[in-house]
Image (cartoon, rainbow, N blue to C red):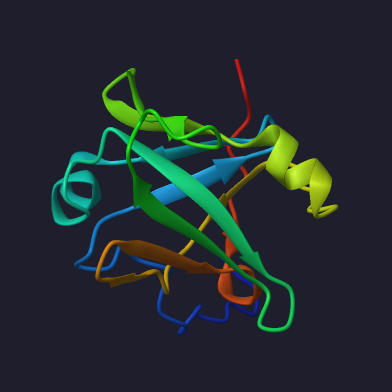
């Protein structure tokens, strides 16, 4: 076909070897089995925010803590509801975001907001 075609040479975002987690505009984190396993299969987490470095931290917690959020299995993934947390820190989302630079540090899962990327998936 005639035209001036330019090849896209940038590497696509790929799942890292730690697994995969996303955050949608309904305030729900979804984690795959690989990450859930590497994170220690916790029953619950507490949520933390670092406004200086713009990072969210999920820390493994006992489920009976007042501020603990239980992790639930949902459609083949592990779900953590966080809408009140996002509202508290005025973290506004439109769509679903992924965290390619996540880090697991001891009993913490650290998600830098400045390196997240958005998908174009539409809800059904």
Q: Residue at x 45, y 54 (%)?
A: 58
Farthest residue to the right: give it. Answer: 90
Based on the displayed image, in which of its 4 quarters is residue 65 positioned?
top left
Q: Is residue 92 visible?
A: no
Quarter holding the C terminus?
A: top right
Q: Residue at x 34, y 66 (%)?
A: 14
User: Vertical placement of 44 versus 116: above or below?
Assistant: above
User: Vertical placement of 21 versus 28: above or below?
Assistant: below
Residue 90 in the image, given as x and y percentages of width and height: 85, 52
Residue 8 in the image, given as x and y percentages of width and height: 50, 78
| Apparent side of residue 106 relative to residue 116 in the rendered image (left or right) | left
Farthest residue to the front: give it. Answer: 65
Based on the displayed image, in which of its 4 quarters is residue 25 positioned?
top right
Q: Is residue 103 visible?
A: yes
Quarter holding the N terminus?
A: bottom right
| Apparent side of residue 38 relative to residue 14 in the rendered image (left or right) | left
Residue 116 in the image, given as x and y percentages of width and height: 58, 66
Report the front residue among 75 and 59: 59
Q: Residue at x 16, y 50 (%)?
A: 40
User: Vertical placement of 48 versus 27: above or below?
Assistant: below
| Apparent side of residue 30 relative to residue 86 in the rendered image (left or right) | left
């Amino acid at each position: 076909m005639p035209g001036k075609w330019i090849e896209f040479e940038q590497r696509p975002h790929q799942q890292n070897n730690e697994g995969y987690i996303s955050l949608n505009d309904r305030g729900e984190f979804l984690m795959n089995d690989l990450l859930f396993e590497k994170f220690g299969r916790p029953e619950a987490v507490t949520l933390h925010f670092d406004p200086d470095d713009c990072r969210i931290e999920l820390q493994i917690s006992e489920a009976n803590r007042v501020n603990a959020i239980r992790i639930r299995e949902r459609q083949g993934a592990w779900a953590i509801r966080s809408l009140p947390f996002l509202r508290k820190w005025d973290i506004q989302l439109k769509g679903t975001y992924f965290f390619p630079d996540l880090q697991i540090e001891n009993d913490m899962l650290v998600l830098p907001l400045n390196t997240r990327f958005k998908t174009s998936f539409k809800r059904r």
